[in-house]
Each structure stands twice: as C-alpha cells, then as structure tokens.
Amino acid sequence: MSDGPLAGVRVVEAATLFAAPLASMLLGDFGAEVVKIEHPTQPDPARGHGASKDGIGLWSKTLSRNKRLITLSLSTPGGSDAFLRLVERSDVVIENFRPGTLERWGVGPDDLFAVNPKVVIARITGFGQTGPYASRPGFGTLAEAMSGFAALNGEPDGPPLLPPLALADGVTAFAAAFAILAALRARETTGRGQVVDLSLIEPLMLLLGPQLAQVDLLGELEQRTGNRSSHNAPRNVYRTADDRWVAVSASATSVAERVLRLVGRPELVEQPWFATGAGRVAHVEEIDAAVAIWIAERSRAEVIAAFEAAQAAIAPVYDARDVLADPQLQAIGAIADVPDGDLGRVLMSNVVARLSETPGAIRWAGRAHGADTAEVLAEIGIGPAELARLREYGAA
C-alpha cells in the first residue's frame, strides 16, 4: 500500500489512450489506489502506440504505472454489476467514453451516485458532455486544431503545425487531476460527490493567453511567428559552429541588453526602440541576424559558457539522449529507473513534483493486460467460481 499524500483515495479508471489515463497516473503517483479497467479482448490502444520492446509497448509502462489492471466489459450485465461494486467502495471514477455511453450501459452518473453518493465522476471527452459536438469522436489532435493552438504554431509562411506529442491530452490530464482534487475537497464540506465535465479543448485554450480578448477588444488576430515571439526579441533557436542548436530567450529588456552586448552589437542597445519588447520585435530581423552570426562562429559549449558568464538566458536544444545525460536532471531525480517484470527495467519521467514531507513515488511500471483482475475482484466478493462465469460470458 502507498503512503503518499493521496493514500486512501480509491480511483477507478475506465478509459483509453492518453488524457484520462494520464490523469489517473498523476493521482497514483501521489499515492491514490488506482484500478484501471480494460476490455477483456480489446486492451487500451495505448499499449500499441509508439515504440515497443519484445512486443511490449513502452508508452503503457508509464501510463499504467502504479495501477492495478483488471479486465471488465461494462456493456455486459456481469461486467456492469462488477463495475458498480467497485464504484461502491471508490472515491473517484475517471472515464472517457462518448457522452451517453455509460448511461446506455446502466452505469451513468445517476447509477453511480445511487450506489455511492460521495463518488467524484470525471468525464473527459473531446468536446464536453453537452452541445452540438458532444457526440463526435474527439482526440487531442482535434483539440489542438480547434483550441487555436495549431493556428499559432509554425512558420509565418507555412501551414498550421500540430505538435509531435499528445499536448492537448497532457494539458487536460493535469487539469483533470486538479479538478478531481478540487471536487474531493468540496466533498469534505458538502458530503456529496459531483460530476467533473472536461473537454480536451478548454485546458489548451487557457494556455494561449489573451488571444480571445485581443481579437474581441482590439480586432487583432495573433499570427504564427515560428520560433520567434510576437512580444519580445531575441527569442529563437540558433545553429552553432558544430552543427548543434541552442535556444535563446530575452523576455526582459535587461537580458536582451546583455545578449546584444555579448554578440558585439552595443549600438543596438542604445536605440530608443530597444527599450520595449514591441520595439525589438519591430527590428527583429536585425537583432536575430546579429545573434545568429555570432553563435554560428562558435561551438555550442563556447556559446553556452559565454551566455552564462554574461547572465543571459540560453539552453541547448536536447534530444532524448541529451536529456538522459544532463547532470541537472540527474541531480533532481527527473528520470526514474523502474524495475519491471517484463523488461527488467524501464526508464521514464519521474513524479512531476517533489513534496518534502509526503513525496510521491513510482511503485511499479505498467503491468500486463488483466494482471490484477482476480485479486481486485476478489476484494469486492467475486471469487474464482464467479470470475470463471464472468469470463465465460465475456464480461471479465
């Protein structure tokens, strides 16, 4: 059993792919007891996403860490009954079926509240539970397009650019975990559970800043700027003499001054327009050229050392090999080396925050499909004979 800050919180996850499973993973990292339900014959598709080793998907090793994995078919009478018995003893349900699906199976919110009025039900979908798009299939890619993110991402003369990762799902997972904890806190006062309704679009919208007010109040539509910023300069990635890349950010005027003095262009600092971010953006071509030329004449190590000596903000552009080798990330324990029954060991991102008194932990990596079915169902009174019947009917 866990002794993390969420120890004693029981979570049932009936979800696939990324946002909802990531949300329950975050809760599990901090001690919640998470039971993940997968279909008996159709496992979570995340098991087949991305790279694999010996036929074992590596994504699911992280997504399903700290979870007990069982199989149930919620659309069958036996499976739905077992689900209700699980919910009866749980604090949180996380699901991401299309709106109306759980209701059709007889395990919608009304049914769950009937067996457990205190349960918090997090419903994560592409578009939310209501509205004209509610019944549409929803994935992170659609949210990245419809939130306004893709329209702002990419080069000015290129197409809108989608991220190479599950960005909307990841942001939604953090939002969902936060909302679930808020609902659990409210339960301490009200004594009742509630439904958390969260779309994939809204959390990503929040990160895009004041663009809605900007177009409403000013009639201005934010444009794609590539790696540049529409608010400050210099801000870009630059190639070094040894064919590596570095990222430079100068959001504050004082930092921009240090950068331009370092690269030998102090006369630009003296210009009246240099004192504001908008002024520097108006002269971004000249500023960027000065920085790019200076960096291109030096190795990455030389560039970083010079920027650090000048107290100017810079970072190397890493790939995964660099991340693994970085001494700072090693020092803070950002990478976990987790023992695993299938692969021996697997590296993954560690718990996202370090709590000084009640830290989270990765207790185990994601396990095999249905690895904990017999044990978990036995805890709710389903013994070997009943489990055999459920499996005979395709319910477990």
Image (cartoon, grey):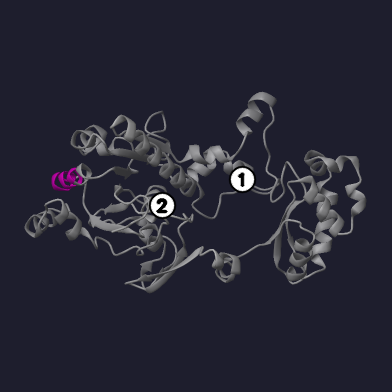
Q: Residue 55 location, x and y as percent?
A: 36, 70
Q: List the single residue furthest toward the front.
A: 357
Residue 268 visible within the image: yes
Which callout, 2 or 1, points to the residue nearer the camera?
A: 2
Identify the residue at horizontal 67%, vertical 48% (top origin): 158
Please state the extent of the stretch shown in magenta in the rendering.
Answer: 76-85
Using a 10 Å C-alpha cutoff, classify the residue at mark 1 as few (fewer than 14 neighbours), some (14 to 19) or many (20 or more). some
Q: Quadrant of the C terminus?
A: bottom left
Q: Nearer the viewer, residue 278 or 2?
A: 2
Identify residue for label 2.
26
If the image is split into quadrants, where does the N terminus sit?
Answer: bottom left
Q: Please tell me whether mark 2 sits on a helix, a strand or a loop.
A: helix
- Residue 160 disc label: 1
Determine whether 27 is above or below 309 in the image. above
Q: Judge whether residue 83 is colored magenta.
A: yes
What amino acid type should be assigned to the residue bearing mark 2?
Leu
Q: Quadrant of residue 326?
A: bottom right
Residue type of the residue flagged with mark 1: Pro
State the residue at coordinates (72%, 49%).
228
Q: Residue sitting at 33 percent across and 55 percent down? A: 44
Chain-order first, disc 2 or disc 1: 2
Secondary structure at badge 1 equals loop
Image location (x, y in percent) of residue 319: 59, 65
What secondary structure characterizes most of the magenta part? helix
